[in-house]
Amino acid sequence: MSTTAPILAPAAELPDWARQAVNLADLRLGAIPLTASDQFFAPLERMLKPEPAAFIPGLYDDNGKWMDGWETRRKRTTGHDWSVIKLARRGVIQGFDVDTSHFTGNYAPAVSIEATDVAGDALDTAVWTEVLPATSLQGNRHHLLPITNRQGWTHLRIHIYPDGGIARLRVYGQVTGVFAGLPAGSEVDLAAALNGARAVAWNDAHYGQPANLLLPGRGVNMGDGWETRRRREPGHDWCVLALAAPGVIERLEVDTAHFKGNYPDRCSIQAALVEGGTDQSLITQSMFWPLLLPEQPLSMDAIHEFTTQIVRLGPVSHVRFNIHPDGGVSRLRLWGRVGA
């Protein structure tokens, strides 16, 4: 095995339609690779990994060069390869990032994507709709491909023509229908990505993205959270989050799992019910939102639960999570009731 350090693919420069969405094909949220016509060189599951694609020079396995993505063998018959994935949640798709990073002489020359909306995995009688027509690809690059279809989908069928590899597939969209039929008064996590919450804006994310705050479970390590650089000037760090739905927050959790010498000294939360405007305009507005949680001390590697400290603001749709002065937080949970 090679000891050469992995070469990581650069992140895509996301347009607004992707930056303001949730990756519905994220393994961490529960996306599932179901089946593929061929996975000879690299398994389908790797295409859904959340981290950037890596290339490790000199690393080979029994079938050839190790590649970080889904890669089929060279096709010597008619036809083309395909795969099927289940999205983490039913959602409306804004578009895709078809990433061929590190695939140069072995990338798929073209891709098309179909979608269906079914309960469970009953795909034998599924009706598939083309949401992305056949599109040419290039090697070693991100392909950011918006779509106009606004139906809700649960599964995707990815066609590659005729064979080859895709490093990552990101499916940017909005979770839909999560709270349909929910009994009145049910407590839900309004800050869960699986319910449709998303990170809107932030002042710094040097070591970890605010979207990690919204992931399920506890963080697996210090890289699985939101962490800012060391602040060398006055002030504090912050991020703005859009809740899954407007609701009344009744208890919250701030989890500093794995953050020991770098957890924030304190945190506070501002909140508001926002109507109109854009994500960019929220940055200025959020500075003047009322406090939902006044400044509270934090400790290392612990879950902090707050109930009596919460200010009763009524329904809110967005929060501004402030950490004083800087540092890292693994997860944020905002438990409450949807609506008034």
Image (cartoon, rainbow, N blue to C red):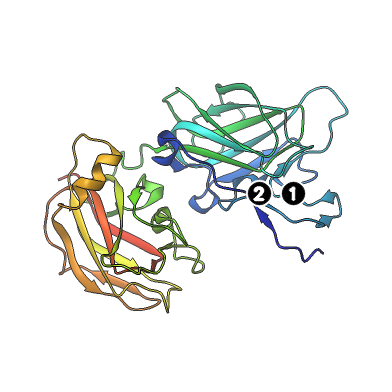
Which residue lies under the disc numbered 2?
46
At x 28%, y 64%, the residue is 236
Disc 2 residue type (three-letter)? Arg
Label 1 sits on a secondary structure element that is: loop
Viewed as shown, does residue 113 lie left or right of 177? right
Is residue 24 at least partly visible in the picture? yes
The residue lying at 82 percent from left, 38 percent from top is: 73
Q: Are marks 2 and 1 in contact (CB under 8 Å)?
A: yes
Query: As shown in the figure, which amino acid type bears the numbered disc 1?
Result: Met
- Viewer-nearest of discs 2 and 1: 1
- Where residue 191 sits in the image (x, y, percent)? 32, 53
User: At which x and y percent is residue 65?
Assistant: 82, 50
- Residue receiving disc 1: 67
Callout 2 secondary element: helix
Q: Nearer the viewer, residue 99 or 229?
A: 229
The label shown at residue 295 is: none
Quadrant (top left, top right, bottom left, bottom right) of the N terminus: bottom right
Q: Is residue 223 above or below residue 114?
A: below
Compared across the picture, whether 287 is left or right of 70 comes to: left
Badge 2: how crowded within 10 Å, few (<14), some, or many (20+)? many
Height in image: 292 above or below 115? below
Number of dots carrying numbers: 2
Q: Point out residue 64 in the picture as x, y percentages from the top left corner.
A: 85, 49
Report whether 218 appears left or right of 126.
left
Q: Earlier in the sequence, mark 2 or mark 1?
A: 2
Q: Which residue is nearer to you in this view: 237 or 41?
A: 237
Closest to the observer, 299 or 149: 299
Q: Can residue 248 be seen in this view?
A: no
Q: Residue at x 19, y 53 (%)?
A: 287
